[in-house]
Image (tube, rainbow, N blue to C red):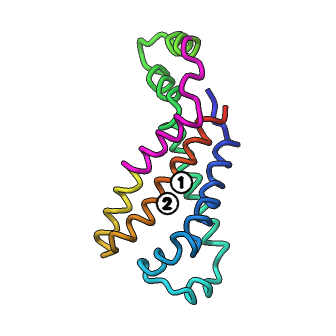
Amino acid sequence: MSINWMALVAATLSSLVTGFLWYNPKVFGTIWMREAGITEEAAKSNNNMVKIFGMTLLYAFFISFTLQFMVIHQWGALSATKDIAGVDPSVLQNYLTAYGDTYRTVKHGMLHGFMTGLFLALPVLGTSAIYEKRSFKYVLVTGGYWVLTCMIMGGIICGWK
């Protein structure tokens, strides 16, 4: 089994597309700016967009790279049987022969991406928000973005064979 770099790049880029839509002022952008304490003028005056989008893409790539191990069950089978003393390497081959691409669908990847967003990203963000004295609306908007983004990324990564 090998890493599908094209799927990871597509998943990474999907986070930008989702963010452009989610944080649009007509969707949740206005609420997010208000809850984050950012004015429209301050947002427009940011002249370091290369750094912002560069780091955004780097972090999204880190997420997509890690997410593949959560949404593709075959990685779990590989890690459970590879290089373990006393485990016959044919165990993995037998598993892959029997189950092949079972659960390698967009729908299944979206399910696991959703669960990762809900049970990993949202609690991390929510915990930070408590200490930063952010509002519950802020957590809902930002956490909602990450749940949706992980869901889309998971669908891309799992479904792209």
Q: Is residue 117 magenta?
A: yes
Image height of 134 relative to 125, above or below:
below
In the displayed structure image, the side of residue 158 where residue 142 appears, left or right: left
Residue at 52% from the left image edge and 34% from the top image edge: 108
Circle 1 — which element?
helix
The type of residue carrying mark 2 is Tyr
On the image, the x and y values in percent for residue 115 come to 42, 44
Image height of 152 relative to 78, above or below: below
**Tags 2 and 1 touching, CB below 8 Å:** yes
Principal secondary structure, stretch drawn in magenta: helix
Mark 1: amino acid: Thr
Question: Residue 80 appears at what percent x and percent y?
Answer: 44, 23
Identity of the residue drawn at 56% across and 13% down: 93
Q: Quadrant of residue 103?
A: top right
Determine crowd level at label 1: few under 14, some 14-19, many 20+ residues with C-alpha closer than 10 A. many
Query: With respect to residue 112, does 34 lie above or below?
Result: below
- Frontmost residue, 97 versus 79: 97
Quadrant for the N terminus, please.
top right
User: Tag on residue 23?
Assistant: none
Q: Which residues are magenta?
A: 98-119
| Residue that badge 1 annotates | 149
Q: Residue at x 62, y 66 (%)?
A: 20
